[in-house]
Amino acid sequence: MLTLSANAADWKIAGDTITAPWAEKVNPANPLPEYPRPQMVRKDWTNLNGLWDYAIRPKDAPQPDKYDGKILVPYPVESALSGVRKPVTPSDRLWYRQVFKAPDLSKGKRLLLHFGAVDWQATVFVNGKEVGHHQGGYDPFTFDITDAINPDRWDQTLVVSVWDPTDTQVQPRGKQVLQPKGIWYTAVTGIWQTVWLEPVATTYISEIRSTTDVDLGKVTVSITIRGPLDGIEPEMTRELEGGIETVGSLANEPVKDFSFTIQNPKLWSVENPNLYDVKVRLKRNGEPIDEVSTYFAMRKIEVKRSTADGHMRIHLNNKPLFLIGPLDQGWWPDGLYTAPTDDALKYDIEIMKKLGLNMARKHVKVEPDRWYYWCDKLGFLVWQDMPSAMAAPDTRIKRNDPKDATFTKEQAENFRTELHAMVESLRNHPCIIAWVPFNEGWGQHDTNEVLKSVKQLDPTRLVDGPSGWADRGWGDLHDMHHYPTPEMYPAEPTRASVLGEFGGLGLPLPGHTWVIERKWGYRNLTTQAELQKQYEDLITQLPPLIEKGLSAAVYTQTTDVEGEVNGLMTYDRKVIKLDAERVAPMHRKLYEPSK
């Protein structure tokens, strides 16, 4: 891997915000150096993260001749780790510029430019030529920039133009607002995930998708090939305990399915997150031209009637499993949408497991691919929310409102496009077991049509329908929100009853809060001992509900976030508010088999 060089003197953490312990470990010469796409890994790549030029200009102004200073990509411009920490309004446009050296493109190679995520509309130029435009703040995108590269020059100029309406228009934006307060947080604009280059052959693997059947032990790995197919032979190998096995090969197909069976497969679970490693190669006339490493897991998720008590329950690998975990916002005091380091991403999951929790509901935000990789690797289940889309009052509905929100045709089509892009980009991760298209009436429109479209796109996972407030009778889960005490909808014959949010016990700890005033929680406490006692009381109220058919409970929330102080940890992750040795056995008792 190649990286950009940078002058550390050009960067420092902006402002006086609290920071997580990993902030001081951020290297401005090589921030977030890990390969950003763990399920489709190539060895040859160039990380473009680092110090770029930036400028904030009026929305309709031309590309600037002069820039305002340096920004550390991929941290959002509003964040402290960007080194800028300035707001960008809907009347502004954010510009980025970087100069890079193109890798060797001899022998007909192509050069791909990847963006993990850019919020919200991005137009990309290389050497003054527009190479592509993308709309959507949460899904990855790629442009082939080969034809824009100047082979006679060392330096190539990359410019990115970004516009983001935040909460003034109806597009997926989660909890971002221009005026943050309470449960609404600081806006995020522009590049917020890794940017990288990847040279590939004229014909290369552009996509890999794995599907598994636990009952039959069957695996299908589908690959999509882009480019001329003459003389092309795809080949897949998988690692076994006794060595490496070649699964098969076949020539001249743009989409190739490798199907095989595994005798006595090692299933993926929270306790034993078994992953199978595979490599896919392309050969042309017998010569290797592309190789990608990936992995898959054998696991099955469904809602069906429990033979033990007759209730509809969530089953993992044909066994009922009660789910207990936090509402996980995925925000950071220093990087906002972007964690300071990969270790920071991993830490949150490790702490949740240490607390005896087995799942998280990723709340109206999508994470970088590596967060899901660590959930896959460590064994942690995920309900994945779609970031909410809402602006005007008629795009939010009230609790138990019989009518859906009003979306224009353009707004509805845009939401559906971004929702499906999220599902497609994350569907290979075994940790994800449920999609949550709507939260609490926030932009809830065409409810059952949207839910059914997700189920049709991915029938292997559960679809929550929707999470809290205005249920429309469809979906795998009937989801209640109730604060602070746990409650449930009565058990029913076709869906599992779940508690998508409860708790929210607030405890501000001096020196660890984002704001001095306006600290917010569903119930505000003053000491950790008081929090411990009230939290344990809430957990002891779950077993009677489980007996009545409750299948999952989601506590609000993993960490404090900006004005919210109802986290299991402080916003800076420096204090775990609960005693793990006391609560972990309480959590595990809810889902581990009796001994």
Image: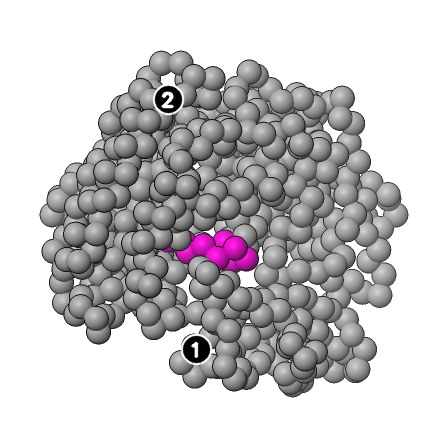
Q: Position of residue 541 (x, y in %)?
A: 20, 45
* For residue 19, side relative to residue 493 (left or right): right
Tell me the residue at 85%/61% (across/down).
106
Tell me the residue at 14%/67% (across/down).
493
Q: Position of residue 218 (x, y in %)?
A: 48, 81
* For residue 54, side relative to residue 180 (left or right): right
Q: Please give the residue where the numbered disc 1 appears in the rendered image.
A: 213
Q: Amino acid at mark 1?
A: Asp
Gap in angstroms between the C-alphas marked 1 and 2? 47 Å
* For residue 152, side relative to residue 51 (left or right): right
Q: Is residue 349 above or below residue 511?
A: below
Q: Amino acid at mark 2?
A: Pro
* Residue 408 in sight from this viewpoint: no
Q: Please give the residue where the numbered disc 2 appears in the rendered image.
A: 508
The one nearer the camera, 409 or 395, is 395
Q: Is residue 276 above or below residue 541?
A: below
Tell me the residue at 40%/80% (across/down).
215
How many residues crowd around disc 2 within 10 Å: few (fewer than 14), some, or many (20 or more)?
many
Figure quadrant of residue 400: top left
Q: Position of residue 538 (x, y in %)?
A: 23, 40
Q: Tell me which segment is drawn in magenta.
A: 375-385
Per the image, label 1 sits on a secondary structure element best described as strand
Image label count: 2
